[in-house]
Image (cartoon, rainbow, N blue to C red):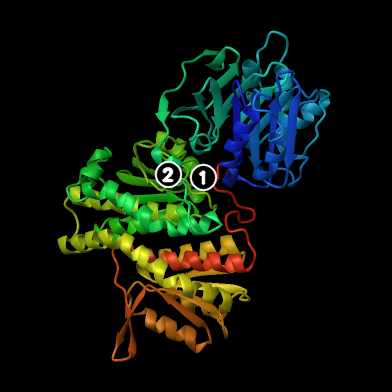
Amino acid sequence: MCGITAYRGPTAAASRARNALERLEYRGYDSAGIAARRPDGSMMHARTLSGVAALAVVVGEEPADATTAAIGHTRWATHGEVSEANAHPLEDCGGRLYVVHNGIIDNADALRARLVGAGHRFATGVDSEVIVHLVEQAQRPGVGLGDALADAVTHLSGSWAVVVLDARSGALAATAHGSPLISAEAGGGTFFASDVGAIAPEVDEFRVLEDDDVVEVDAAGPRWHRSGGSCRPRGLWPVPRTALLSSTGRHRDHMGNEIDEQPLIARRVLEALSPGIADGRLWRGLGLPSLDGIDRVAVLGCGTSLHAGRAVAGVFGRLGGMPTRTLVASEVAHEVWEPRTLVIAISQSGETADVLRALEALPPRHGTVLALTNNTSSTLARRSDAVIDCLAGPEVGVAATKTFVAQVLTGVCVALSGLAAADRGDSACVDADLRALAATPDALAAALDTWRGPCAQLAADHARASGFLFLGRGAGLVYAAEGALKLKELSYRWAEAQPAGELKHGPLALVTTGTPVFVVDNGDPRLDVDIAEVTARGGRVIRIGERVLNVGGVALHLPRTGPSWGPLESVIPLQMFARELALRLHRDVDKPRNLAKSVTVS
């Protein structure tokens, strides 16, 4: 989940690496560091626990032409405590080699013992340090940096994206295995980064390192090879236009602006995809087989992406009458897979390790894999039979908001198009869903306007609550689960989502006087009974998703009836409340503790 970046070029290497690192900080903010080589061979090496911004003080002291090669890192700790000593870049025994690493080295303890026995001195408790010592050991006279790195990783077990900087020559070498890394060239220099968004302002196109590719960059430029020989550079990918569309607005935090952006995101998705729904063009354009040849749909995901997948599965199930199941990606190792299955794998980054591992476990001839991702050049996209971009643009806040809405709407458009292409589903219900889909941007905007004030007041009222209960039925349950997840991520308070019908089977014991209970109302009349049970025990019910009309001076509550994917706009007040409560509790809503944006380790 760490973010790594590097640059070798004629000027301002440290500044370019630091700027790229700033756009990668969402991948980990336990520590940050940079190492840069000056033309005289001396090194700038700075590490901090105060975030990437703190590196600007060091880098800003340098003239533009003072550094010609640099590597940077922002850390999400796995092995070793959060400390400046454990921050990357890490160096070898002699201060010649510096390394940054994203991933986990499974056999680090055994390698460390062997290297210590060979005389190497370790300065940290992190697994990554074995890499720099292995490269140091392999770099003998006549062995270039790229070959030394290629030799070093043959001893590793686990996952890695690695960039090494040689202070003596100024060369860089990079490789990857099971962890994302890209390369790009511009202005006479070469970049490396974990994510194209880090370098999107600097480049127009990039290359993706496949497993075990090695790229070495020195005065002669970049050279690609693999163990045992050279290889041609990988094909070029254009930088997606959405990579440059960062959220701006009235809030100081990114999350607030990203919540506000959701009606715009919905319009973007629908403008791009809805013209291909009714005639099935969207489905066929993805190269997917007809639903007549598919018996069932399985959705793979983690966290928020899994919740989005559950909403999408509702279209296939409720509208198309197809058997569906949603699977936690980290728990599918022992699933029994059936033939003629459409697997929809959902990951914002396209690099979620548990999703990729789940795909590796699929048996031959299981069916078709459709990737739904915000990164169409990602590992997930490249390993799938078809891919669709959810068009959310960069999301900086670690807790997903606009990407959830984009994933739901993108998946819904694809599902409706598939049903249309196969002429499945009741026509009146399909028409109703299409009308609801077209109205979604306005529904999201109305939810923002309606709930802005009430959410702030609710946060003030419940700032001392120790726990929260979220309830839903049918299509509303997905949004109750997402609301509970957002509250946990941002406020660090306990929150539990339950089917409302399960209250009497245990969860009602949690309710006492003043317990806040959010109810996502999808129009199921049985919710009135569930709400009465909560109210009778003193719980405070916050009902979301209903319509309130004034009839003769009396407030008349009408439960909303929604489309097959449920009341998507109900997620807006749930996100807003979680953010408002977290701000009131003085939490950093963009960087919740212990979390990072792209979960590239499992």
- Rendered location of residue 565, percent (x, y): 33, 61
Marks 1 and 2 close (CB-CB < 8 Å): no
Please state which of residues 409 and 286 is positioned toward the viewer in this rendering. Answer: 409
Q: Mark 1 and mark 2: span between their CA atoms?
A: 17 Å
Q: Is residue 277 above or below residue 68?
A: below
Is residue 199 shown left or right of residue 235?
right
Q: Earlier in the sequence, mark 1 or mark 2?
A: 1
Q: Which residue is mark 2?
A: 374
Please state which of residues 354 and 337 is positioned toward the viewer in this rendering. Answer: 354
Residue 584 position by quadrant = bottom right
Is residue 513 visible in the rendered structure shown here?
yes
The numbered dot on residue 125 is none
Q: Residue at point 42% right, 23% down? A: 235
Residue 105 position by quadrant = top right
> In the structure shown, which secondary structural element does the residue marked by tag 1 occupy?
helix
Q: Residue at point 59% right, 73% down? A: 467
Q: Is residue 178 above or below residue 42?
A: below
The quadrant of the picture occupied by the N terminus is: top right
Q: Which residue is mark 1?
A: 354
Residue at the front extreme of this rendering: 63
Characterize the local packing of mark 2: few (<14), some (14-19) or many (20 or more) Cα atoms within 10 angstroms. Answer: many
